[in-house]
Structure formats: C-alpha cells, structure tokens
Amino acid sequence: MMTSVRMKKILVTGALGQIGLELTPVLRKRYGKDNVIASDIRSPSKNFLNSGPFESLNILNRTDLEEVIKVYDIDTVFHLAAILSATGEKNPQNALEVNLFGVYNILEVSRKLNLTRVFVPSSIAVFGPETSKINAPQDISLRPRTIYGITKVTGELLSNYYYYKFGLDVRGLRWPGIISTSPPGGGTTDYAVEMFYYAVEGKRYKCFVREDTVLPMMYMPDCLKSAIMLMEADLSRLKHHADFNVGGMSFSAGELAAEIKKRIPSFEVDYEPDFRQEIADTWPKSIDDSDARIEWGWSASYNITSMAEEMINKLMKVRNT
C-alpha cells in the first residue's frame, strides 16, 4: 500500500494558467484554503482573489520569490509558471528565460530555504522525432526540436541534479496535452480544448493540425490527480524523480471531432495545418507510463468517451447560466 505524505504550506506559481486555475482550488479543499498560496505575474479575478491567499509574483525575481516563501513559511512548491510550446516558438528568447531561469530560481531558493518538496512538471515535448511514436519509453535519449521541449529537458536534468547533489525532493511528470474547461494557454494541443468550445457555441472549427494527427492527451481531473498522487507518494518508492512518463489517452483530431459530433451532430471541422503541425509531428502518439504505475500506483480514470461526455455537459451548463 502506498504511503501518503502530507504537505503543510503550499505555493503555486502560475496559478492563473490552465492547470493552476484548477489545481489551486483542489489543493485548498485538500489542505485548507489558507495553506495554499496562489501566485502569478497576472492579476486574478475578484472571485479567485477572494478564494484564498494570492501574491503577485514574477518567478524571475528571486528576491521576491524568497520573500514570499519566508513570509508564508512554505514547505512545498508546485511550479506551474511557464511559456508553452506554440507560444514559445514565436518568442524563443522569452521562453528560454522564463522556463529555464524560472525553474532555476525555484530550485535554488528551495535548496537555500530547505523546502520539503518541489513539483516541476515536464511535458511530452521532451521527445523528439527520433523517439518511438508508439509507447515512447521512459528512459531514452531526448532530442526535442522546440525551445519548449529543450527547456523541459533541461528542467528535468536540473531537477534531478538538485535531488542527487543537494537532497532536494524534486518531482515531475511528462504531461501530455491537457483537456479542460479552463482556457488553454498557447500549447500545440490547444485544438483539443478549442473543439469543445466551438461545438458548444454552435460554430465551425478550423483545426490547426491534420485530421489524422494522433497525440497523447489527458483530461484535467486526471492531470490534477497525477500531480497530487506523485507529490504525496513515499519517496522511498521512487526510482525516478523529475521525469515520469504519465499517460491518459491517445486519439486523432478526427476521432475527437467524431466523438463530439455524436453529441452535437451539427459540429463541423475544417483541417488547415499551420506551424504547430510541425511541432506535433515530432511528438509520440502514445507513451509508456509503466514506471509511474509501478512506483506510485498511477492509472488514468478517463477515456475519450467519458471525457467528451463530461466536457460537453460542463460547458453546456456554463453556457446556459
């Protein structure tokens, strides 16, 4: 049986992003709203601001980061602030700065202040075109072709270095594309979210990847579950640390459109690939997450059918309120 490790005071960086908006309330429900401090460089909505502690924070400012951690007596960080793949290709210099120096600042301040645990997520973007397209393995040479993937590989290496060199308990997952009711943030898999929005609004969608493009995906509840499960896992069970493959489901853009069309028959999609197709073509179609299953008991709860059903129901409720 897995031993669950409790966290005390948690800082979430990038809390206003696609994942942060949903992870923060889940952590607050689990650990208490005053024990989870949200932070972002952007300004929150009034509702978010009223839901618990919030700090305006630029992760590139190490002095401010250290001060926030000290003031709130933080022992755990979920570091979600990042520039994603498609956005990163438009401004690689900015992506390099935010994604690399942001991670370095988090790790260095955490080492200096002797934090208990740090979560630094990675991505399937670490894989390059040489990687096996089917069941991409856990341990393999990584040669990504995007600046986002390059920064994620470097983040994995840095995180593992801080674990082995300084004993800092850093953990991370190679998340696939994340599907959620929260707006996407500039990733190559954003089409999987946008399709649902357009379908519910009765609009025709122009998809920026080919109909036959297959990529690994994960529904947000599984995304949140994976992060919390890994962070609560007994360290003695982990052979890997900052680079776990973690899977949910795989499907093509056309298969997703067909699944949506079963519920919204009027939905139509045009396929007009742009520069993001080249990024998608370098990524695997599925990944092998057997190490995560063995080391901390991972398994996804959703498939394409149950995910599509729930997504449409949720978006319909929002649209009708």
Image (cartoon, rainbow, N blue to C red):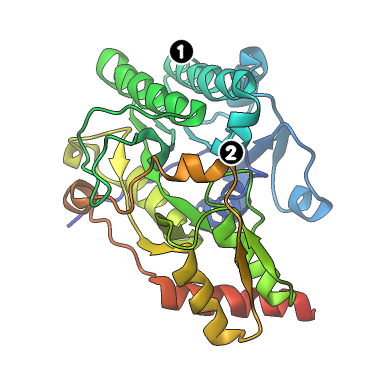
Which residue type carries mark 2?
Ala
Residue 58 x/y as whole percent: 68, 24
Q: Residues within 10 Å of mark 1 (few under 14, many from 20)?
A: few
Q: Quadrant of residue 101?
A: top right
Observer able to see residue 5: no
Q: Which quarter of the rendered picture does the C terminus lie within?
A: bottom right
Q: Is residue 240 above or below residue 48?
A: above
Q: Is mark 1 on a helix, strand or loop?
A: helix
Residue at 79% over, 56% down: 47
Residue 114 x/y as whole percent: 42, 19
Q: Is mark 2 on a helix, strand or loop?
A: helix
Could you say which is closer to the camera, residue 65 or residue 59?
A: 59
* Residue wearing tag 2: 86
Q: In this view, does 91 lie above or below 21?
A: above
* Residue wearing tag 1: 112
- So how many labels did they put on this image? 2
